[in-house]
Amino acid sequence: MAKTNFQYEKRQRELEKKRKADEKARRKEEAKSRPAGEQDPDTGDEAAEDDTTAARQE
């Protein structure tokens, strides 16, 4: 019977944890850089932000 490669399994778990942490950090950073109501959440269009800024200045 073949032995289980514990080092490989551990490495895969570590990589999965790192991937999830990176994804969470990316989402958190996006949320921080996009305050509510300033950008279109569906498209991420920055033009919408420029339009609202111009409207405020007038």
Image: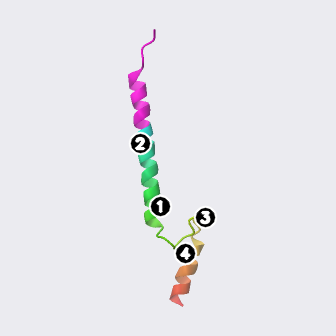
Question: Which x, y percent locates residue 13?
Answer: 42, 34
Q: Which residue is mark 3?
A: 43
Badge 3 marks a residue whose secondary structure is: loop
Q: Which residue is mark 2?
A: 18
Q: 10 Å neighbourhood of mark 3: few (<14), some, or many (≥20)? A: few
Q: Is residue 5 above or below residue 18?
A: above
Query: Which image quadrant is residue 2 in?
Result: top left
- First along the sequence among labels 4 and 3: 3
Q: 10 Å neighbourhood of mark 1: few (<14), some, or many (≥20)? A: few
Q: Residue at x 42, y 20 (%)?
A: 5
- First along the sequence among labels 1 and 2: 2
Alpha carbon separation for disc pair 1 and 2: 18 Å
Alpha carbon separation for disc pair 3 and 2: 27 Å
Alpha carbon separation for disc pair 1 and 4: 15 Å
Residue type at the position of mark 2? Lys
Give the magenta-colored segment's residue range: 1-15
Question: Which x, y percent locates residue 10?
Answer: 39, 29
